[in-house]
Amino acid sequence: MTGRAETPATADTGWRRLAGDFAESPPAVVCLGLVLLILGLAAAAPWITPQNPYDLAQLDILDGRLPPGSESFAGVPYWLGTDAQGRDMLSAILYGIRTSLLVALSAGALAFATGLGLGLIAAYARGTVDALIMRVVDLMLGFPAILTTMILIVVLGRGTDKVILALAVVQWAYFARTARSAALVEVEKDYVAAARGLGASHGRILLRHLLPNCLPPMIVVGTVQVANAISLEATLSFLGIGLPVTEPSLGLLIANGFKYLLSGLYWISVFPGIALLVMVMSINIVGDQLREVLNPHSSR
């Protein structure tokens, strides 16, 4: 017995209804298309870009600081120009998006699993366990995320894996609080009491009954936190304490071009900034529409 027993036909109808509700917002549909396009371009970056911008053997200093629309000495078009090292900006942006998405999705998955598990346990166990977990959550949420992340990076050291771990530590509390709130509503329902009466184990109740019914709000939070993780990683890299300079990062690209803004070489910093803005904005708008679609009390 579960909270939502659905046949394949009703499940298909439910997905169609959700898709129809989502399509009621044209901006959200456009942003979803942008997100999918960005994902596709980032995944195909090694095959569609004219160079690997972080392979020194493929860089030529003679191609440095070329404006958008220029061609290299070898005749390769650089649609977004190059930076001071001769790095194609379009290639660098796509590689940077790959890294941003890898870091954000990895940190989000780790935070999602940790927060979901602790939130379900807190709501189901109640009492001392609930109080202890929620006091830790309150403590984590009481500090600014960027400050906590910077402290963790200083302690852990630089590196992609360290940034992922730091972001996960910062974000798990959001998932835990959301999971607990959703599970507190579900744990009082009749199907949970029936499962207990039938002798179902605690693990079965958590995994088979509470978990599926707590996923919709968690998906919304996960979408927002992925966008936040992208922004945090870019901020850390811009400040020089995030990813190493040998790794592609939108934050590093913006930082590298920042010193050239006043000299007229705007494209080195502006184009990565636009890519970051569009990506974060699109994910946030998609997450906002998902919140409206998955919220049963929404008055669309």
Image (cartoon, rainbow, N blue to C red):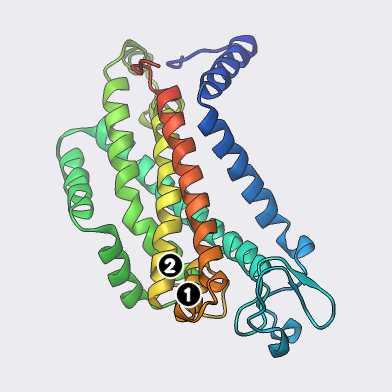
Residue beneath disc 2: 163
Q: Furthest-bottom residue in view?
A: 61
Crowd rating for badge 2 (residues with CA inside 10 Å; few <14, some 14–19, many 20+) = many
- 122 or 12, nearer to the observer: 12
The kind of residue tagged 2 is Val
Tell me: 93 left or right of 241: right
x%, y% of residue 177?
A: 27, 39
Residue 273 position in % (x across, y down): 49, 62
Would residue 209 be visible to someone looking at this image? no
Query: What is the residue that sits farthest to the right in this orientation?
Result: 75
**Residue depicted at 37% across the width and 13% down the height:** 191
Whether the residues at callouts 1 and 2 have beta carbons within 8 Å, the answer is yes
Q: Would you place residue 49 above or below residue 239 in this image?
A: above
Disc number at residue 227? none
Looking at the picture, does residue 88 appear above or below residue 27?
Answer: below
Q: In which quarter of the image is residue 236?
A: bottom left
Left or right: 182, with 142 as reference point: right
The Cα atoms of the two marked residues, 1 and 2, are separated by: 6 Å
Q: Regarding mark 1 in the picture, which secondary structure is present there?
A: loop
Q: In this view, does 34 lie to the left or right of 176?
A: right
Q: How far across and down, in percent of the image, does residue 207 sit?
A: 44, 31
Quadrant housing residue 194: top left
Quadrant where the image shows the C terminus:
top left
Neighbour tally class for label 1: few under 14, some 14-19, many 20 plus, Cα within 10 Å: some
Under mark 1, the amino acid is Gly
In terms of secondary structure, where does tag 2 sit?
Answer: helix
Rendering coords of residue 46 (x, y %): 74, 64
Which residue: 46% across, 30% down?
290
Q: Name the residue under label 1.
A: 159
Q: Which of 166 and 284 is in front in this view?
A: 284
